[in-house]
């Protein structure tokens, strides 16, 4: 355990650096919520209208004219985001040496997202740790701690937890579990009023099946192996099935009002993060 | 042992395993290759696909075929196949082996003996007795038939058996065979020499066939023994005829002419046309060499018939004609020597001149036309020559008739005798038939040959025996006397048709021929005397001591066991007896009767094929593994597959490539040649020193521009040449600056440079060290030392400092010195140049660094300072360059300017 933790930790600093880099790139591209709300940042002055609290009147501004102005701040309501990434064995796979493993990419995305969220003042927590969400650097530290700890029973989908209402949930994984399993899980979360984001991380090889010849495929999570005599002849069928599966996922997400997107490991992590962060930001603006 | 043609299997029962191949086929068809294992996360989706694809995988048919081939190769290999298996004998009785030990069996006798020994060996293995039967003529009983022997004894006989230099007597062999009481269950073999011997041979073959299963071994047609026929002894050239028993394909053989001491004098190829039995080979040799030829033989054919021995009859004799060296060309028909010359040229080498000149070289015969008494000096020279074996043949005429000379065979009466004519009853006399003792015996005497005048001999006791030819009335017309080893011969009439029409007849030529032949020491009567064998040929055509069976040769005996081919007579008078003419009708062995197996001697060594087959199987197995990996996708991408296939293909090719010479750099060479020749170009030698080379290039480029501007020479950009690789012949002028880092040219390059100089090229050496401070004036500067090193291997003519009137001074500009970057360095040119060449000095040597003075950059600015004269000196350097190129390209025509003053002066007058 200890050894594995160390091993994992040894790979983490670069991951962390990558996550920070990714996050920094994206943070410049994403702006604030651009709405009036609770917060500390000045947003605008507006005429006083009856009903405004006297505390909100900006006296210094009002003294410069005959009007009474109210100082409005930008909306900075903190939100709770629960993060989860797939740690199952099937994620520890890459088709080519120059591609990262899916698990690594998922973790980079998750960490980068966490950095962005914490930077935006949100409260985050790792799903399945049973810890309340926190904000600030402490939250990052806790998240890091949780990520480094090996999961007891890694699975393709998270176990259901009764999350508080209006919490946001981000699930990053290959989402290759049977659709029914995913549907029931999403259903449970939705019934709690949780809004979610699904990001499917796939290796390009899982999309195109670029193998040839007679191949015995072994499952990575104890599934039965599959012997295919001429893999190249099955590419078309396989791609169809994959698209079907993804369509099923998209359907589940749409039905639940969740966000769904697919990220390939041969694309840059930034693009995945941008997609995800954009979705989250939209969510908060709506 | 299972035998299929030249292939046999030592363990044929293993071939039964071939029946398993169809089973292997079926197994391979249904058993797919092992899959490659691959972890894959999206396996659930694959599972959705699986049911549809559960059809069993099949191995492609060609892969099955490959594997079947591997299996078949292994099975065949284990069955131990043998190529050219050792001979096997049929039956179980004695083994009767008849072998031709004639001359025709001598070539490839080793093959025959090997086969014979193998057969005996085989008989030994099977514990059978052996009967050896030889067929050559003259064999005694013991050799003819060995009787029934144990194989061990037979082997001893077989090992000692050698071919005889004569033909076969199959009837005797048949008789010897009949004497043996043999059971019929014998195995018989006939090791024939491949020539047809008529009915006796058929009888022998049938007899052998009756005894048991018969195998006739005969050489294939191209290996049949050939024969060499002796040349016509009196033809002007040595023309020897080679004959082969059967026509068919074109063939070539070398004919060698060998001297008595074994020296090879000449070798000429004999080419048989496809349908030709004979071919003639002509040896054109100087007389001295021709006379040394003692033996002609077909190369690589060790047989008595392939050797022709030459005796004195084939010597081409040098014959001297006493008289002026030149014909009187205006009236040749009045010249005595003309008739002699015409008669002798076909068979003898004729020399003309006074006696003293003639005797300076070896001569066999001296012919002397009508002359008076010989001067004492000539007499003194001729007498010892005749004593030593020379033949002096004189012709009579008015001068001799009135002279008193004793260098004639018989005493002559003064004056001559006229036969016929206006005032005579007598008629011109024809010649009588020649006596048997005369050297002319056998020559036909034409009736129209008549003699009108002759000189008469004094009657004497010895006159009759000294007379070689008479007229019909009995008066001698040719007399001869033996003097010491030689002869004096007198023809009692003239060598021109004034006294007789004999010189115009064919008989005259024949008589001269006989006289010339006489000079060999073979007298006409000698042929009837018994000639004891001197040295004879053995079956392989080697000269050996005569066998005991040989007896003296009388007349024209046939070659046989009594008269083996070889030399007969005595050491001084040898007569060659050749086998060739007696076997000139040889024909190949006819069709064999039915039931007789025919085999070839060309049984190579038994070759065991097992390792080859197993190796082939191994290679195919490796190929199969590669294919298997490909099919399973374990060789991803195309590049590795291609590399593997290329490797497989290259393995045999690599070995081949080592023996193959590197491909010629034809294109590069051609491109260089085109570049160098399509326009005039200056050239410089690439020294390997980058700075020097660049200076040379820029310098010559500037010079080319100057030339284009000022003269009609418009050279293209200069070319650098590599003396090791590039052809120099394209350049009239090659500039070669000395650089200290320059490597020494290889010997090949030096040779090419020498050739270039010899063929009229001009090398301009520039040691570039005139500005250096030289510590040792004898050694010279560094450039001079380098040049000395390089030039050591070049053949450079003697050089002199440029004389003031040298063409280099005035080829275009009038110059007094030749400055470059430096001034004052001495310029050397070739001392003299042989007339007939262009008289351009092949080497011009200086030290002024001309290229440095010429060199300028792209914008025309000079690169190096010129000392001490500045720009004026640079201009002079350019002028020298112009002169140099002019001189190299136009040669010495400006040298004619020397004569201009003289010519003008003459014209003015």
Image: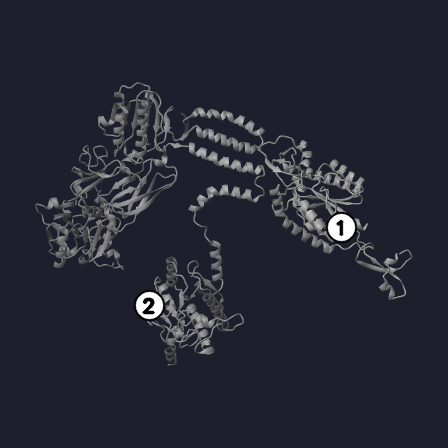
Tag 1 and tag 2 share a subunit: no
Quadrant containing the N terminus of chain B is top left
From the viewer's side, name the closer residue of B306 and B538.
Answer: B538
Q: Residue farthest to the left?
A: B461
Q: Are marks 1 and 2 in contact (CB under 8 Å)?
A: no
Can residue B202 be seen in this snapshot?
no
Can residue B765 be seen in this snapshot?
yes
From the viewer's side, name the closer residue of B822 and B810.
Answer: B822
Indicate the position of residue B483 as horizontal and vertical percent values.
Answer: 12, 49
Q: Residue farthest to the bottom?
A: B909
Above-or-below relation of B901 to A21: below
**Residue B726 placement, left or right of B364:** right
Mark 1 crowdedness (10 Å alpha carbons): few <14, some 14-19, many ≥20: many
**Residue A249 placement, left or right of B504:** right
Tell me the mark number nearer the camera, choosing from 1 and 2: 1
From the viewer's side, name the closer residue of B159 and B420.
Answer: B159
The quarter holding residue B12 reads top left
Indicate the position of residue B19 as horizontal and vertical percent values.
Answer: 50, 25
What SS does tag 1 mark?
loop
The quarter holding residue B559 reads top left
What SS does tag 2 mark?
loop
Tell me, for residue A122, which label it has, or none: 1
**Residue B344 placement, left or right of A286:** left
Determine the chain carrying the residue at label 2. B
Tell me, for residue B349, which label it has, or none: none
Indicate the position of residue B707 as horizontal and vertical percent values.
Answer: 48, 71
Q: How is the image coloured?
A: one colour
**Residue B405 placement, left or right of B725:** left
Q: Label 2 belongs to which residue?
A: B798
> Residue placed at 9% from the left, 45% from the top?
B462
Determine the chain carrying the residue at label 1. A
Above-or-below relation of B406 to B281: below
């Amino acid at each position: 355990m200890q050894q594995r933790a160390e091993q994992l930790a040894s790979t983490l600093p670069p991951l962390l650096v990558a996550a920070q880099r990714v996050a920094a790139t994206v943070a410049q591209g994403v702006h604030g919520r651009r709405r009036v709300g609770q917060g500390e940042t000045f947003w605008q002055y507006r005429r006083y209208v009856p009903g405004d609290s006297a505390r909100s009147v900006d006296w210094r501004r009002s003294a410069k004219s005959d009007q009474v102005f109210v100082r409005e701040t930008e909306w900075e309501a903190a939100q709770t985001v629960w993060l989860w990434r797939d740690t199952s064995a099937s994620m520890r796979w890459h088709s080519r040496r120059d591609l990262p493993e899916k698990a690594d990419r998922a973790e980079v995305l998750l960490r980068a997202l966490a950095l962005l969220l914490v930077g935006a003042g949100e409260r985050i927590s790792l799903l399945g740790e049973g810890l309340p969400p926190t904000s600030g650097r402490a939250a990052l530290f806790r998240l890091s701690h949780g990520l480094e700890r090996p999961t007891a029973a890694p699975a393709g989908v998270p176990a259901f937890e009764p999350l508080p209402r209006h919490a946001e949930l981000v699930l990053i994984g290959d989402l290759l579990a049977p659709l029914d399993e995913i549907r029931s899980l999403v259903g449970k979360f939705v019934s709690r009023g949780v809004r979610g984001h699904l990001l499917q991380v796939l290796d390009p090889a899982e999309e195109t099946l670029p193998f040839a010849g007679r191949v015995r495929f072994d499952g990575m999570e104890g599934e039965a192996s599959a012997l295919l005599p001429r893999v190249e002849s099955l590419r078309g069928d396989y791609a169809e099935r994959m698209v079907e599966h993804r369509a099923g996922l998209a359907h589940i997400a749409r039905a639940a009002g969740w966000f769904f997107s697919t990220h390939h490991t041969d694309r840059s992590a930034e693009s995945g993060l941008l997609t995800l962060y954009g979705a989250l930001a939209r969510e908060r603006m709506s | 042992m299972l035998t299929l043609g030249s292939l046999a299997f030592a363990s044929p029962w293993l071939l039964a395993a071939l029946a398993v191949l169809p089973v292997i086929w079926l197994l391979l068809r249904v058993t797919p290759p092992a899959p490659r294992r691959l972890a894959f996360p999206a396996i659930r989706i694959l599972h959705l696909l699986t049911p549809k694809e559960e059809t069993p995988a099949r191995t492609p048919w060609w892969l099955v075929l490959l594997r079947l081939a591997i299996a078949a190769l292994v099975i065949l290999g284990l069955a131990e196949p043998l190529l050219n298996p050792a001979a096997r004998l049929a039956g179980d009785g004695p083994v009767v082996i008849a072998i031709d030990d004639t001359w025709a069996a001598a070539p490839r006798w080793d093959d025959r003996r090997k086969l014979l020994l193998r057969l005996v060996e085989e008989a030994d293995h099977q514990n059978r007795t052996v009967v050896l039967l030889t067929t050559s003529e003259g064999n005694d009983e013991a050799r003819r038939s060995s009787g029934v022997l144990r194989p061990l004894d037979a082997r001893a006989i077989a090992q000692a058996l050698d071919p005889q230099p004569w033909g076969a007597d199959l009837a005797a062999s048949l008789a010897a065979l009949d004497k043996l009481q043999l059971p019929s269950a014998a195995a018989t073999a006939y090791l024939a020499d491949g020539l047809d011997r008529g009915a006796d041979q058929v009888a022998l073959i049938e007899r052998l066939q009756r005894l048991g299963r018969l195998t006739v071994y005969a050489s294939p047609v191209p290996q049949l023994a050939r024969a060499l026929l002796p040349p016509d002894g009196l033809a002007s050239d040595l023309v020897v005829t080679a004959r082969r028993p059967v026509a068919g394909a074109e063939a070539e053989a070398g004919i060698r002419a060998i001297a008595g001491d074994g020296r090879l004098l000449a070798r000429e190829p004999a080419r048989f046309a496809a349908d030709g039995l004979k071919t003639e080979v002509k040896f054109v040799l100087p007389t001295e060499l021709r006379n040394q030829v003692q033996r002609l033989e077909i190369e690589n054919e060790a047989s008595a018939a392939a050797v022709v021995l030459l005796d004195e009859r084939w010597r081409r004799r040098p014959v001297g004609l006493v008289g002026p060296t030149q014909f009187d060309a205006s009236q040749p028909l009045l010249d005595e020597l003309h008739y002699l010359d015409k008669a002798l040229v076909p068979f003898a080498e004729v020399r003309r001149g006074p006696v003293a000149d003639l005797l300076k070289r070896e001569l066999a015969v001296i012919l002397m036309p009508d002359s008076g008494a010989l001067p004492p000096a000539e007499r003194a020279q001729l007498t010892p020559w005749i004593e030593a074996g020379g033949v002096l043949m004189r012709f009579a005429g008015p001068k001799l008739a009135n002279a008193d000379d004793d260098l004639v065979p018989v005493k002559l009466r003064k004056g001559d005798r006229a036969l016929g004519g206006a005032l005579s009853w007598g008629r011109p006399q024809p010649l009588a038939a020649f006596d048997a003792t005369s050297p002319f015996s056998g020559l036909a005497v034409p009736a129209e040959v008549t003699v009108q005048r002759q000189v008469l001999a004094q009657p004497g006791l010895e006159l009759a025996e000294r007379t070689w030819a008479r007229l019909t009335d009995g008066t001698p017309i040719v007399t001869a006397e033996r003097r010491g080893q030689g002869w004096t011969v007198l023809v009692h009439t003239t060598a021109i048709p004034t006294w007789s029409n004999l010189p115009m007849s064919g008989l005259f030529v024949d008589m001269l021929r006989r006289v010339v032949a006489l000079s060999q020491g073979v007298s006409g009567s000698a042929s009837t005397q018994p000639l004891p064998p001197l040295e004879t040929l053995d079956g392989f055509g080697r000269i050996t001591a005569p066998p005991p069976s040989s007896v003296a040769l009388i007349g024209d005996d046939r070659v046989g066991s009594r008269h083996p081919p070889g030399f007969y007579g005595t050491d001084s008078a040898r007569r060659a007896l050749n086998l060739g003419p007696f076997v000139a009708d040889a024909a190949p062995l006819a069709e064999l009767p039915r039931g007789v197996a025919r085999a070839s001697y060309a049984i190579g060594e038994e070759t065991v094929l097992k390792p080859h087959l197993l190796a082939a199987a191994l290679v195919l197995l490796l190929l199969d593994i590669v294919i298997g990996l490909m099919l399973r996708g374990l060789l991803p991408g195309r590049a590795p597959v291609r590399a593997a296939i290329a490797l497989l293909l290259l393995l045999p090719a690599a070995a081949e490539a080592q023996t193959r010479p590197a491909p010629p750099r034809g294109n590069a060479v051609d491109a260089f040649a085109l570049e160098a020749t399509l326009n005039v170009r200056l050239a410089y030698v690439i020294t390997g020193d980058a700075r020097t080379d660049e200076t040379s290039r820029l310098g010559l480029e500037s010079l080319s521009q100057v030339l284009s501007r000022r003269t009609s020479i418009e050279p293209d950009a200069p070319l650098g040449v590599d003396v090791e690789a590039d052809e120099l012949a394209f350049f009239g002028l090659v500039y070669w600056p000395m650089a200290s880092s320059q490597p020494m040219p290889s010997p090949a390059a030096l040779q090419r440079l020498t050739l270039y100089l010899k063929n009229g090229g001009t090398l301009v050496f520039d040691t570039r060290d005139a500005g250096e401070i030289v510590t040792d004036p004898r050694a010279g500067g560094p450039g001079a030392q380098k040049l000395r090193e390089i030039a050591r291997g070049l053949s450079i003519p003697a050089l002199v400092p440029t004389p003031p009137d040298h063409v280099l001074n005035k080829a275009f500009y009038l110059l007094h010195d030749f400055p470059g970057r430096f001034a004052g360095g001495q310029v050397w040119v070739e001392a003299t140049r042989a007339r007939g060449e262009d008289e351009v000095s092949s080497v011009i040597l200086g030290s002024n660094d001309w290229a440095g003075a010429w060199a300028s950059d792209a914008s025309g600015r000079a690169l190096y300072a010129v000392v001490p004269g500045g720009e004026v000196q640079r201009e002079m350097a350019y002028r020298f360059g112009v002169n140099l190129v002019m001189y190299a390209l136009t040669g010495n025509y400006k040298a004619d300017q020397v004569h201009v003053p003289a010519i003008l002066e003459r014209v003015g007058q």
